[in-house]
Amino acid sequence: MNAGPGLELSGRTVVLVVTGGVAAYKSAELARLLVRDGARVHVVMTEAAGHFIGAATFQAITGEPVWSDLWDARMSNGMAHINLTRDAQLVLIAPATADSIARLAQGRADDLASTLCLARDASCALMVAPAMNRQMWEHAATVRNINMLRSDGAFVIGPASGEQACGELGPGRMVEAEELHDAVCAHFTPKVLAGRRVLITAGPTAETIDPVRVVTNLSSGRMGYALAREAARAGAEVTLVSGPTGLDCPHGTVRINVRSAAEMHSAVLARYQACDVFIAVAAVADYRPAAPSLRKIKKSADTLSIEMVRNPDILAEVAGRADAPFCVGFAAESHDLDGYAQAKRLSKKLPLVVGNLVADGLGGDENEVVLYDDAGRHPLQRASKPVLARAILAHLSRMLDR
Ligand code: PMT
């Protein structure tokens, strides 16, 4: 059932404790995402959780038996409360009800979920995703219990604010499965960029021709967004300046939306001084229409010519400044990757360039890249953009640490 090596969570074992809240339905999706990324997931359900979701759902998703009874005899030594966490690196309680949080804070051990939390050893972290009514969340007893859990070393994720199952509005919703999955991945990511501030451009730009038409390109933003997400997981403070894409803002990053190269230029120039690293992944239009029409251009003649003027080269401008951060450029070429990428690195005075062929990198989920630095060329195997982003950032962090 578990996926092969190379996935972000391969080799990781997570105990997912599901307690009795409506948000238990989100935990099925969470289990799916963890398994998809290679984790082995043992699900433990409290008795109350069984009122909201069935064990068969988790068993089918994880391919593992589901546990709920402290006295379950299926474990050969009858000690599920000990054995379940012995090969696990994380216990994640999602949803964590007010009652389960109170019981954890007290160190209770009268059901399987509470006992296995108490019986964890220090190498197995505890992450808690609260889910409850807003009054329960804000009650002094819950505040006290959550603070107690935090001081005992637990990581508390959420809750989010919004519409609640009871119809009230406020804090107490369990965060979405994707965000919890992201928190788990971040937990396991080495913090090689801790303390670094990273500015990233991503996506295409769109240059106005008239009120309904633009000049743009096929960049999806996936490569830049993957770098932003992985840099945040690696501990960096990330600002993402993004051209128009359909992608969600990566968790833990600040996104500035722009449209044209001129807007991207202003957004970067206003922020680069507050950064240690600038990674220019965006496919910025080199030219824009000289005089965009304020009215829709009507078809009349058989041909149409639009005069184009050069856009500023954002990366060259930042890299050329006396106070430039560590600059990483991308080079997208249709041929002679080595020649053009090295030329860009030298002409823009960049310590690191990531080269890719347009046919490999533009648009899709995967890419094949070569890193170019003073030490030469370092080809990376074809892989998904998140996998490549981790490898690029690992290379970058080694250069920063030199
Ligand atoms: O978005 P995806 O679909 O995931 O695709 C990823 C990608 C192919 C867009 C990405 O991997 C990539 O190669 N990005 C750079 C594309 C590009 O514009 O390359 P370039 O060789 O034209 O530019 C060289 C460098 O200068 C780039 O870092 C670019 O961001 C920067 N530049 C270029 C022009 C300009 N006016 N300002 C810039 O900052």
Image (spheres, rainbow, N blue to C red):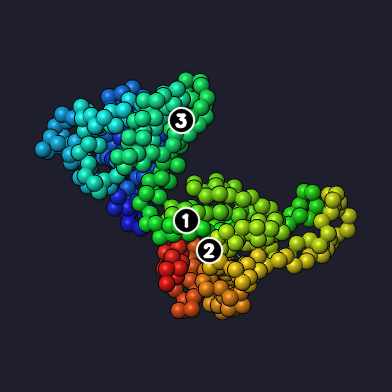
Residue tagged 2 = 277
Front residue of 54/320: it is 320
Tag on residue 173?
3
Relative to 226, 72 lies left or right: left
Q: SS for tag 1?
A: loop
Name the outermost residue toward the right.
300
Task: Single out the mark in the foreground, 3 or 1.
Answer: 1
Q: Work out whether residue 53 can be spotted.
A: no
Name the amino acid type tagged 2. Val
From the top left corner, tell me how far across and down residue 224 is, in percent.
54, 57
From the top left corner, tell me how far across and down residue 142 is, in percent.
37, 27
Say whether disc 3 or disc 2 marks the residue closer to the N-terminus: 3
Q: How many C-alpha atoms fall within 10 Å of the one at disc 1: few (<14), some, or many (≥20)? A: many
At a point 29% along the width and 53% down the height, the residue shown is: 11
Relative to 173, 312 lies left or right: right
Q: Work out whether residue 209 can be spotted.
A: yes
Check if mark 2's residue and mark 1's residue have beta carbons within 8 Å: yes
Name the amino acid type tagged 3. Arg
Name the amino acid type tagged 1. Ala
Residue tagged 1 = 236
Task: Single out the mark in the foreground, 3 or 2.
Answer: 2
At a point 85% along the width and 49% down the height, the residue shown is: 295
- Compared with residue 324, is residue 218 higher up or lower down, i.e. above or below? above
At a point 48% along the width and 71% down the height, the residue shown is: 371
Name the outermost residue toward the left.
77
| Residue 304 found in image quarter | bottom right
Tag on residue 95?
none
- Looking at the image, in which quadrant does ligand 1 appear? bottom right
Gap between marks 3 and 1 measured at Cα: 27 Å
Q: SS for tag 3?
A: strand
Gap between marks 2 and 1 measured at Cα: 10 Å
Say whether disc 2 or disc 1 marks the residue closer to the N-terminus: 1
